């Protein structure tokens, strides 16, 4: 069952668009085809469009593609607080329960931040089939917050106009 995004606080639309464009431009995101559909405070929704290239030999979407979708959705939820300075997050732990096979349909991932700490952020992600409405997978993630900004992250921040905030 998908969540009602309106229950989450809206964030700056320009920030959300810029974040989504940067992430979607990465080579791995382009390989998978993931698309950010919505970001709100502590919430992100992504779509993984169906492509037969993502299937495993039995005809279902490969678990690795689903795991990547879960991770990407979690990153989106952690980055959704546009009032905070952009920080780098690293996935420390990811537990996935695969619930049913995804056969020839787009997948939707919804990620929700459950707890924001100084050093870690806990996120839950649910994946649902767009056509079947089946629960495909559930993930629980822990991200480590890195205080030191890499040159790549500094460049990303400057492109969003967020350096010095």
Image: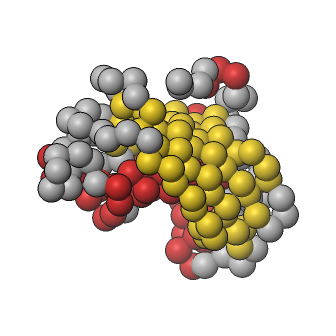
Q: From this viewpoint, is residue 39 visible?
A: yes
Q: Position of residue 129 (x, y in %)?
A: 36, 31
Q: Considering the image in quadrants, where does the C terminus appear?
A: bottom right
Residue at the image point whose x is 70% and y is 22% from the top: 7
Horizontal arrangement in the rendering, residue 50 relative to residue 25 (left or right): left
Horizontal arrangement in the rendering, residue 118 relative to residue 155 (left or right): right
Query: Nearest the camera: 92 or 163?
Result: 92
The furthest residue to the right: 118
Residue at the image point whose x is 23% and y is 37% from the top: 103
Horizontal arrangement in the rendering, residue 111 relative to residue 106 (left or right): right
Horizontal arrangement in the rendering, residue 92 relative to residue 104 (left or right): right
Q: From this viewpoint, is residue 12 visible?
A: no
Q: Position of residue 115 (x, y in %)?
A: 79, 49
**Compared to 99, does 87 lie above or below?**
below
Q: Position of residue 128 (x, y in %)?
A: 43, 33
Residue at the image point whose x is 53% and y is 39% from the top: 126
**Compared to 11, does 61 lie above or below?**
below
């Amino acid at each position: 069952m998908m969540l009602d995004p309106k229950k989450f606080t809206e964030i700056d639309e320009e920030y959300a668009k810029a974040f989504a464009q940067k992430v979607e431009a990465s080579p791995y995101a382009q390989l998978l085809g993931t698309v950010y559909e919505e970001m709100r405070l502590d919430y992100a929704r992504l779509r993984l469009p169906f492509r037969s290239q993502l299937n495993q030999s039995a005809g279902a979407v490969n678990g690795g593609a689903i795991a990547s979708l879960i991770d990407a959705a979690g990153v989106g939820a952690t980055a959704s607080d546009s009032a905070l300075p952009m920080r780098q997050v690293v996935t420390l732990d990811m537990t996935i329960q695969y619930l049913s096979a995804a056969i020839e349909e787009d997948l939707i991932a919804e990620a929700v931040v459950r707890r924001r700490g100084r050093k870690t952020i806990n996120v839950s992600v649910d994946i649902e089939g767009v056509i079947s409405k089946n629960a495909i997978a559930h993930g629980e993630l822990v991200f480590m917050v890195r205080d030191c900004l890499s040159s790549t992250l500094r460049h990303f921040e400057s492109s969003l106009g967020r350096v010095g905030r």
